Image (cartoon, helix red, strand yellow):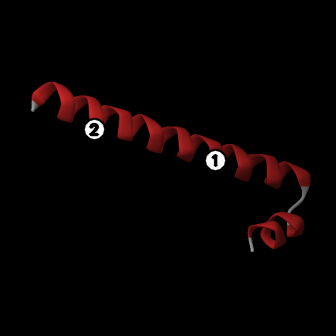
């Protein structure tokens, strides 16, 4: 499904969408790390 979406885009749009996906993944990891650290240090 995601491949079909990517194929319809031109290269610059593809680059932007992949960048957004990477940034989102990094944000999720950072939030998880903060939550885990908070739980470990506070409890």
Percent across and percent down for residue 31 are: 37, 39
Q: Is residue 13 above or below residue 30?
A: below
Quadrant of the rendered image containing residue 13: bottom right
29 relative position to 15: left or right: left
Quarter-of-image position of residue 8 = bottom right
**Secondary structure beneath label 1:** helix
Which class describes the residues within 10 Å of circle 1: few (<14), some (14-19), or many (20+)? Answer: few
In the rendered image, which quarter contains the N terminus? bottom right
- The residue furthest top is 41
- Name the disc covering residue 30, or none: none
Q: Is residue 40 left or right of residue 23?
A: left
Q: Which residue is mark 2?
A: 35
Q: Considering only order in the chain, which callout, 2 or 1, is on the residue closer to the N terminus?
A: 1
Quarter of the image with the C terminus is top left
Query: Where residue 42 appears, x then y in whole percent?
Result: 11, 29
Residue contact at pointers 1 and 2, CB within 8 angstroms: no
Residue 26, x across and y down, in percent: 53, 38
Packing grade of label 2 (10 A; few <14, some 14-19, many >=20) is few
Question: Which residue in the protein does label 1 denote?
Answer: 20
Is residue 7 shown above or below 12?
below
Q: Residue at position x 64%, y 47% from top?
A: 20
Helix, strand or loop at label 2? It is: helix
Counting the numbered discs, the total is 2
Q: Could you tell me residue 36's position as x and y percent?
A: 28, 36
Question: Which residue is at the front of the view, 1 or 14?
Answer: 1
Spatial distance from mark 1 to mark 2, Cα to Cα? 22 Å
Nearest the eye: 43 or 2: 43
Task: Decide which of 42, 18 is in the foreground and name it.
Answer: 42
The one of 8 and 3 positioned closer to us in this rendering: 3
- The nearer-to-camera label among 1 and 2 is 2
Residue shown at 16%/25% (left/top)?
A: 41
Q: Is 27 on the left-hand or right-hand side of 33? A: right
């Amino acid at each position: 499904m995601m491949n079909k979406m990517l194929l319809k885009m031109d290269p610059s749009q593809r680059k932007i969408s992949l960048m957004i996906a990477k940034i989102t993944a990094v944000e999720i990891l950072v939030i998880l790390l903060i939550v885990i650290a908070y739980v470990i240090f506070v409890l």
